[in-house]
Image (tube, rainbow, N blue to C red):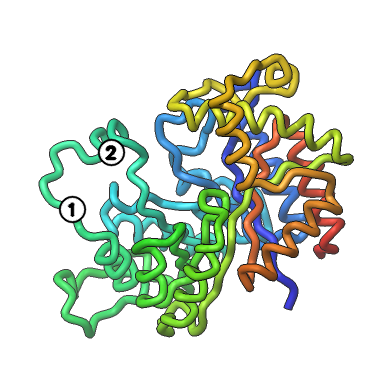
Amino acid sequence: MMTRLNILDYLLIDEGKTAIDAFHNTTELAKLADDLGYHRFWVPEQHHALSIASSSPELLMMHLAGQTNNIRIGSGGIMLPHYSPFKVSEIFRTLEAIHPNRIDLGMGNSTGGRLVNHALNEEKEERLTYEQQVRDIQKYLSDDKESSHRFQKLIATPVTDTQPEMWMLGAGGSSTKIAAELGTAYTYAHFIKPFDVGIEIINTYRKQFKPSLFHDKPIVSIAVFVVVGKTTDEAEQLAKSFDLWMASLETAKNPPYFPNVITASKKYFSPFEKQKINNIRKRAIIGDSSYVKEEIQKLIAKYNCDEVILIPNIPGIENRKTAIKLLAKEFQLT
């Protein structure tokens, strides 16, 4: 079976645009991805990020699922440390009830930084472990009444005939162990750690995987930044915006928008920033569609993955739409 292609869209607020524009743009992109034959369209949970409009992925998912027909809609991902597993289960059961067989529950362990973590967890005295949170969600989504769970009689409503797909997101650490032990699908963040350790992490997940009610076999996807242009030169021009934005984020700045190419072209980078950009480029594929396809195929072979999640952090909605059209054509999606 051909490796599936998916999209993780950050809801970028382009320079000169607003968050409202970002919502409209993402809706357009999701509709196009649905028409082109992409398998999944995910949105992240990002707090206190001024250039990203995706702080409430579950709300965006309800909207996007209602605007599309076939593509699976998911979270990339819900940051579990902040939330009640019972409430998360009820939210995703509601989504699944309205859009059956189209909802993905992607889960992560990020706290979003000190201030965000404090604001979302103020006055909370105790926290569940990450593994316990995932176990709890599985209990609620499976209507398990047999185990010795502390809330054994509690039922997450609405009760549905189908269940969301469960995905653990990570770059190693506890997420790999939990995904294998509890039988969830696993997404490796190549865009965070583009190193050979990823191969070992995925192999460990596959070897240690235990079938569950949610997945009877291991399923692996990898996520990677892509900047695609009609030509190599165009892609490099577009990548200047990606470079500037990422360099700003990774030098503890909070850019108010995703810069356009003109702004990015005028930027002088210090030697320190240039080194940052060189490292960032290792986490992205930049070029024309033929080159990007070739590099994606290399990653598929390297990781032996079932799916690839493309993160098109490219300035301008028309450029993002062109990028996913070009790749859909290269991969002959239907």
Q: Nearer the viewer, residue 9 or 145?
A: 9
Task: Give whichever of discs 2 and 1 has the lower sequence position.
Answer: 2
In three-dimensional space, the C-alpha distance between marks 2 and 1, rounded to whole angstroms, equals: 12 Å
Residue 315, placed above or below residue 44? above
Which amino acid is tagged 1? Arg
Question: Is residue 70 visible from the viewing direction of this image?
Answer: no
Q: Give the residue number, with chain letter if any, for mark 1.
A: 127
Task: Pinpoint residue 323: horizontal percent, then vertical percent.
Answer: 78, 44
Which amino acid is tagged 2? Asn
For the C terminus, the image quarter is: bottom right
Task: Pinpoint residue 287: horizontal percent, then vertical percent.
Answer: 80, 44
Occupied quadrant, residue 35: bottom right
- Which residue does the image show at 30% across and 55% down from the upper left? 87
Give yes or no for contact between labels 2 and 1 (Cβ–Cβ under 8 Å).
no
Question: Is residue 100 visible from the viewing direction of this image?
Answer: yes
Residue 61, placed above or below residue 174? above
Residue 256, placed above or below residue 32? above
Q: Is residue 239 left or right of residue 84?
A: right
- Which residue does the image show at 51% across and 75% down from the upper left? 203
- Which residue does the image show at 59% across and 61% down from the upper left? 222
Q: Is residue 106 left or right of residue 199?
A: left
